[in-house]
Image (tube, grey):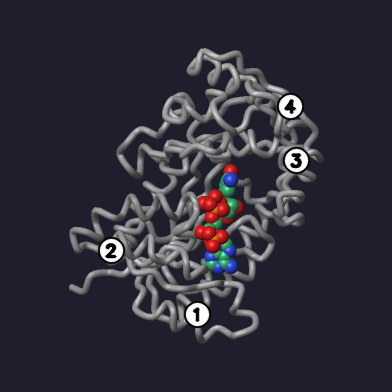
Amino acid sequence: MAIPTILVFGATGKIGGALLDALLPDHAAGRVKLVAAVRRPDAAPAFEARGIEARLIDLDLAETRGLEPLVGALRGVDRVFLLTGYDVKMIAQSKAAIDAARAAGASQIVHLGVHASPDTTIVHFAWHQVVEAYLDRSGVDATHLRPTSFMQNLPLLLQVGGGEPGVLRHYIGDAQTSWIDTGDIARVAAVVLREPKAHAGRAYGLGTEAASMPEIAALIAAVTGLPWRYEAREPAEFLRAMTALGADPVYMACVRNVFERTRNGSLKDAADTFDTVQRVTGRAPITLREYVEKNRAVFSYEGRPGDRRIETA
Ligand SMILES: NC(=O)c1ccc[n+]([C@@H]2O[C@H](COP(=O)([O-])OP(=O)(O)OC[C@H]3O[C@@H](n4cnc5c(N)ncnc54)[C@H](OP(=O)(O)O)[C@@H]3O)[C@@H](O)[C@H]2O)c1
């Protein structure tokens, strides 16, 4: 039997990168062939140095160049991991990727979406659900991964929120929200990509632990022995800061609305957790405490927050 080829979108990002790490042993053993989709030529050598083919794909170019170049770039790919970034363009990007994968003859697409109730009115959650619905009618075997907040957002909060050392700012008041390590999402994705038929037509909620920001600040203080405290800020501040950093204002306005509604308690699914990681991978998920322990240096006031390497596994 031919070795199945797996193409990973978002290879230069958090989950796509962790997914390639998780599948590298399968690639090295000749059980699968990995391909990293990169949109910048200078991103390719790092993958090639690890023996992973890199293909240049910018999903935004489909609008001006048509679908054919994208179909060409996906030729020979059997399985696709589809992830897009924090941008309203995710809807068109996902449609182009699904259309091209189907045209190129792919048999499986694993989509990274978000956890939300089926009747959610949060706009970017709805975008992910629309992409899922489009994928479901594509005729290609589909699996939907639906994570909650990434633990890896915590160091980013230090960059976005500013504030003096030892102050963790967030925008959800004292409400609990659900968290997951991106490495755990990648490990679930790896299992699904290894065994497409076993997971076809399935949707997996991925959130492993619920905690409020005061609880997380107390946890960081306990792990580091430093006097961390939480400072609740206005969600509008988050939108201003992210937009100033160059993020898409349309997408980030949706995130602000999630924070508003988590804070006022009207987002009933915000703190949902699932046993998916244990069930699918056979391994216990990373806890928030383990995450903070692995990234102790990030929370230890040395250097600027975010300067350090963030361990996800
Ligand atoms: N953060 C959370 O708490 C959370 C929770 C639930 C769901 N999610 C979902 O997680 C997804 C983001 O995952 P992530 O954090 O792993 O992303 P990430 O680290 O920001 O990486 C995004 C990836 O997408 C690539 N990309 C962007 N635009 C592209 C284009 N036009 N064509 C091809 N590739 C493109 C980027 O490439 P470059 O390196 O070239 O930019 C990068 O590899 C989003 O769909 C979001 O809705 C996030």
Residue 132 vertical placement versus 102 (above, below): above
Q: Is residue 158 visible?
A: yes
Q: Which mark is residue 238?
A: 3
The amino acid sitting under disc 1 is: Leu
CA–CA distance between discs 4 and 1? Answer: 44 Å
Question: Would you place residue 72 above or below residue 259 in this image?
Answer: below
Which class describes the residues within 10 Å of circle 3: few (<14), some (14-19), or many (20+)?
many
SS at badge 2: loop
Q: Quadrant of residue 232?
A: top right
Q: CA distance from mark 1 to mark 3?
A: 35 Å
User: Which of marks 3 and 1 precedes in the sequence?
Assistant: 1
- Where the C terminus falls, by quadrant? top left
The amino acid pointed to by label 4 is Gly
Q: CA distance from mark 4 to mark 2?
A: 46 Å
Under mark 3, the amino acid is Phe
Q: Which label number is shown at residue 51?
A: 2
Circle nearer the N terminus (2, 3): 2
Measuring from the top left, give residue 199's x and y in whole percent.
37, 56
- Residue at image coords 47%, 26%: 296
Which residue has dot 4 on it? 173
Q: Mark 1 highlights which residue?
A: 70
Q: Secondary structure at mark 3?
A: helix
